[in-house]
Amino acid sequence: MSVFVVVNPRAGSGRTGRRWPDIAAALSGGIGPFDHAFTTGRGHATRLARQAVEAGAELIIAVGGDGTISEAVNGFVTDDGAVRRDCTFAVISAGTGADFVRSLGPSPDPLRGIASGKRRRIDLGRVTYVDDNGNPASRLFINIAGMGLSGEVDRAVNAERMTGLLPGKAAYYIATLGALLRHRSRTVRLTIDDREQLTVDLSMAAIANGQYFGGGMHVAPKARLDSGEFQIVILRGGAKLALARDLRQVYRGAHLDHPMILARTGRHIVAETVDQTGVKVPLDIDGESPGCLKATFEILPGALLLRQ
Ligand SMILES: Nc1ncnc2c1ncn2[C@@H]1O[C@H](COP(=O)(O)OP(=O)(O)OP(=O)(O)O)[C@@H](O)[C@H]1O
């Protein structure tokens, strides 16, 4: 079998690079020979995975955090926008947040899972949106996309990381706190499967394939990777103090009955700002914020063959 491994040596604040010799030894013991390459920066995992898929790789393994996993999955998209269904994907999670793998269930040893050859089909999401230069863009997501506060946090975390002054976790907390303090809710209209239209004063919405984001927040406890639909969790605007106080409920996944939460399911969601201020609502796509509303989220049932 032809195997290609995409490794982000910087993931987990550089831990992945340090662990790579051990991971590589265990991998070759489990699955035999493979090719690999280290990513050098943003978007590189997509290019590496795409080259490998086009060269006939049968299994792509992403080694890194949620950003690397998401970028590598985007390498499965062909020029005409279809997703390659003949190549298998696997992950060795070695990032800081490790949110995607939490939805896969308990797996004491991901290497053993990969070596076992067990495979399952999971859904992917596709989001079309307006990028930061005002151009139409499209991207796959494997875990969670969303809008509002989560997009603001992504941008703040990214800016904080750029300064390089603080280590990963501290940068994340400081950026999140700052984004929360600056945050203002916006009026957004969500059209779900052409059957329901919600116009809400929105702080945040998660369009969830997986269950966790933000480093362990159980935002969409009812989402299933193979359900053929998204779980949609909407947080209305409200007092920030109440928000901060009730945040703990989200970590436990106990927030769905909260008066500030609306929960739905859907396969096709259009989200647009109807806010008179004209302020843009940033997106969150698997932890990155490459653009703003208006956006369309579409489920791609069973699009990815996952070895686990
Ligand atoms: N060599 C590199 N140097 C710096 N950044 C890189 C490099 N290779 C990839 N990247 C970028 O690093 C970013 C973060 O990577 P990733 O998400 O995998 O790790 P993490 O942030 O530690 O984990 P998590 O997202 O699970 O918290 C990605 O957006 C990716 O584009």
Image (cartoon, rainbow, N blue to C red):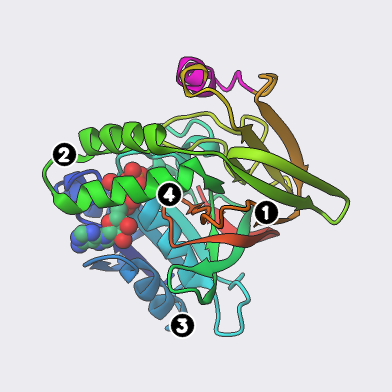
Disc 1/disc 2 C-alpha distance (Å): 38 Å
- The magenta span reads 243-255
Packing grade of label 3 (10 A; few <14, some 14-19, many >=20) is few
Which-is-in-front pick, marks 4 and 3? 4
Packing grade of label 1 (10 A; few <14, some 14-19, many >=20) is some
* Disc on the earlier residue, 3 or 1: 3
The amino acid at mark 1 is: Val
* Disc on the earlier residue, 2 or 4: 2
The amino acid at mark 4 is: Gly
Q: Is mark 1 within 8 Å of ligand 1?
A: no
Disc 1/disc 4 C-alpha distance (Å): 24 Å
Residue at point 22% right, 49% down? 161
Q: Is mark 4 within 8 Å of ligand 1?
A: yes
210 and 270: which is toward the camera: 270
- Image x and y of residue 54, in percent: 46, 82
The amino acid at mark 3 is: Glu
Residue underneath mark 2: 167
Residue underneath mark 4: 287
Packing grade of label 4 (10 A; few <14, some 14-19, many >=20) is many
Q: Is residue 245 magenta?
A: yes
Residue at point 72% right, 50% down? 189
- Toward the left, the furthest residue is 165
Magenta stretch, main secondary structure class: helix
Report helix, strand or loop for mark 1: loop
Q: Is residue 157 magenta?
A: no
Q: Is residue 82 above or below residue 286?
A: below
- Image x and y of residue 158, in percent: 29, 51
Packing grade of label 2 (10 A; few <14, some 14-19, many >=20) is few
Ligand 1, seen in the image, is in the quarter at bottom left
Q: Quadrant of residue 15?
A: top left
Q: Which mark is residue 54?
A: 3
Q: Which mark is residue 274?
A: 1
